[in-house]
């Protein structure tokens, strides 16, 4: 396994129940990116399947949109620079954080 320190931020047990589902969506992808049997094409496909789930499961707000954008950036990184898994993982983490924030978003 590609042991990266960012994996520690892909836990959800500490979150309130209403935020756990948003966080969980990203954990498997993060572990796929760090897997010993890393397959960039498989991870790209996983991102492509995750984006519609986000549209369906997250509220429609700016943070949700940012989450989807960060995942598209992660997909591009996987496709164009598969050797740079650390950068991909950081984009997935940013996407996860945006998704969690989308659940508590309050329109000003």
Image: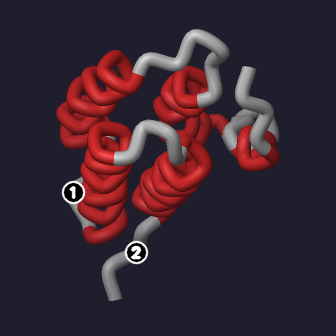
Which residue in the structure is indicated by mark 1?
Answer: 60
Under circle 1, the secondary element is: loop
Name of the residue lying farthest toward the bottom: 108
**98 shown above or below 30:** below
Mark earlier in primary sequence (1, 2): 1
Whether residue 18 is visible, yes or no, is: no
Name of the residue lying farthest toward the top: 37
Marks 1,2: beta carbons within 8 A: no
Residue 8 in percent (x, y) is at 80, 42
Q: Residues within 10 Å of mark 2 (few under 14, many from 20)?
A: few
Say which residue appears at 51% left-offset and 34% top-offset: 26
Residue 34 in percent (x, y) is at 63, 28
Q: CA distance from mark 1 to mark 2?
A: 11 Å
Q: Is residue 53 left or right of residue 18?
A: left
54 or 59, nearer to the observer: 54
Residue 72 in percent (x, y) is at 25, 50
> Quadrant location of residue 57?
top left
Say which residue appears at 79% left-offset and 32% top-offset: 3
Which residue in the structure is indicated by mark 2?
Answer: 106
Residue 94 in percent (x, y) is at 51, 59
Say which residue appears at 29% left-offset and 45% top-offset: 80
Q: Is residue 41 left or right of residue 13?
A: left
Say which residue appears at 37% left-offset and 39% top-offset: 78
10 or 88, nearer to the observer: 88
């Amino acid at each position: 396994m590609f042991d990266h320190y960012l994996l520690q931020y892909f836990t959800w047990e500490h979150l309130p129940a209403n935020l756990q589902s948003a966080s969980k969506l990203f954990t498997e992808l993060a572990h796929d990116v760090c897997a010993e049997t890393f397959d960039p094409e498989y991870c790209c496909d996983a991102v492509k399947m995750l984006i519609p789930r986000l549209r369906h499961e997250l509220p429609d707000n700016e943070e949700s949109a940012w989450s989807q954008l960060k995942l598209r950036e992660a997909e591009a990184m996987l496709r164009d620079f598969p050797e740079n898994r650390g950068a991909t993982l950081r984009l997935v983490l940013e996407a996860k954080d945006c998704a969690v924030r989308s659940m508590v978003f309050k329109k000003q």
